[in-house]
Amino acid sequence: MGVVRTDDSHRAEIDEFRRMLLSCSAVLVKVSTEDEYINRRVLTSRNSNEYAVFQKLVCVTSGVSFLGIAIVKQLVLRGYSVRIIVDNEEDIDRLREIEVSQEIEQSSTFTNNNRIGVVVAKFNDRESLMEAFDGCYTVFHTTAFIDPSGFSGYSKSMAEIEAKAAENVAEACAATPSVRNYVLTSSLLTCIWRDTSNSSLSPVVDHNSWSDESFCSSKKLWYALGKLKAERVSWRIAEEKGLKLTTICSGLITGPRYFCANPSSTLAYLKGGQDMYEHGLLATVDVNKLAEAHVKVHEEMNKSGGGSCT
């Protein structure tokens, strides 16, 4: 969201992206249509015709983040064309440094129906986002952020920035004629932070579970607040504009070298971790499994309406 990354963070992301590109060249993957996920917060959405999935272009925001890289990999392996959004020219320059374009051309998996492109767009500029989304059928918004100050860098102001970015992405999706599906990466934290002294609240986390904004603010759970506001504003716009939306509420994202590649989100997520552990709500998810879930949700959205997954 416009915050400067550290060189180490950049290198980890680019190295992982490079490994992903090289690994794709010798893999043949069949698309699975099995639905393993539970829909919740279902909307009545606009109709769309069925389409040839391997001939469609999709977009991934923050595509060089820990989760973004994994989503791009899963999409590529399933034959999708992917447009990656980065927020500055420096990210593109770093991709060029490792000759990504050459690796794409040389990879046998990257055919005419299976390409990666990179564009610059600003989350605070809807026109910029609409230009980036133009021609894409589905937008995956990973809401990735960079913690500028280490352990305590995710502040109340960053929560507002994240919510505003999600609002702009949703508005841009609704205003872009080609976009039919919007997949938002939310968080389990949008469901679990409530006043547990209220005996009327169900201990079960399901589609009716929403965190309380006042509770998050009073406990200074800014990461949870940012995710909560981002999801709520996305649902509001989807309902108003007829946008087909699915949100994925994941636990703490883990995976190979996750703490080196994803330290900001990890530390921000774990604020309040002791309380989560005591109440049996400290859940984790492997980044590759989560990426697979994003793709499967996208494919199911083409058969039915939007919803939400935990």
Image: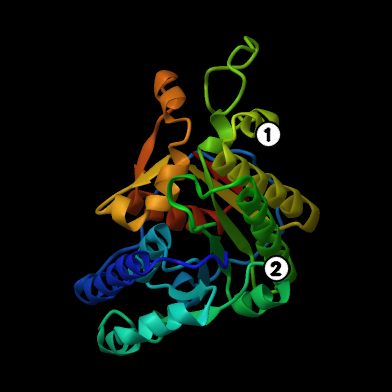
Colour mode of the rendering: rainbow
Q: Position of residue 130 (x, y in %)?
A: 68, 75
Q: Residue at x 32, y 85 (%)?
A: 97
Residue 280 is left or right of residue 254, and the answer is right
Quarter location, residue 108: bottom left
Is residue 247 among what the camera can see?
yes
Return the disc, 1 or 2, that comes first in the chain's sequence: 2
Mark 2: few, some, or many residues within 10 Å (few <14, many ≥20)? many
- Report the front residue among 203 and 41: 203
Tell me which residue sits at (39%, 49%) in the image: 34
Residue at 33% from the left image edge and 58% from the top image edge? 261
Q: Quadrant of the N terminus?
A: bottom right
**On screen, 147 above or below 135?**
above
Looking at numbered disc 2 in the image, what kind of residue is underneath it? Ala
Q: Crowding at label 1, few (<14), some or many (≥20) Cα neighbours within 10 Å? A: some
Q: Mark 1 falls on what kind of element?
A: helix
Q: Nearest the camera: 279 or 132?
A: 279
Identify the residue position indicated by label 2 in the image: 172
> Which residue is identified by label 1?
213
Say left or right for 160 vs 2: right
Residue at x 37%, y 81% (from the top left corner): 95
- Does 55 sit left or right of 175 as displayed? left
Q: Tag 1: residue type?
A: Glu
Most extreme residue toward the right is 240
As rendered, which of 174 and 220 lies closer to the eye?
A: 220
* Up/down of 179 relative to 113, above or below: above
* Residue 67 x %, y %: 41, 57
Q: For marks 1 and 2, give the CA distance.
A: 26 Å
Asked whether the beta carbons under mark 1 and mark 2 sit within 8 Å of each other, the answer is no
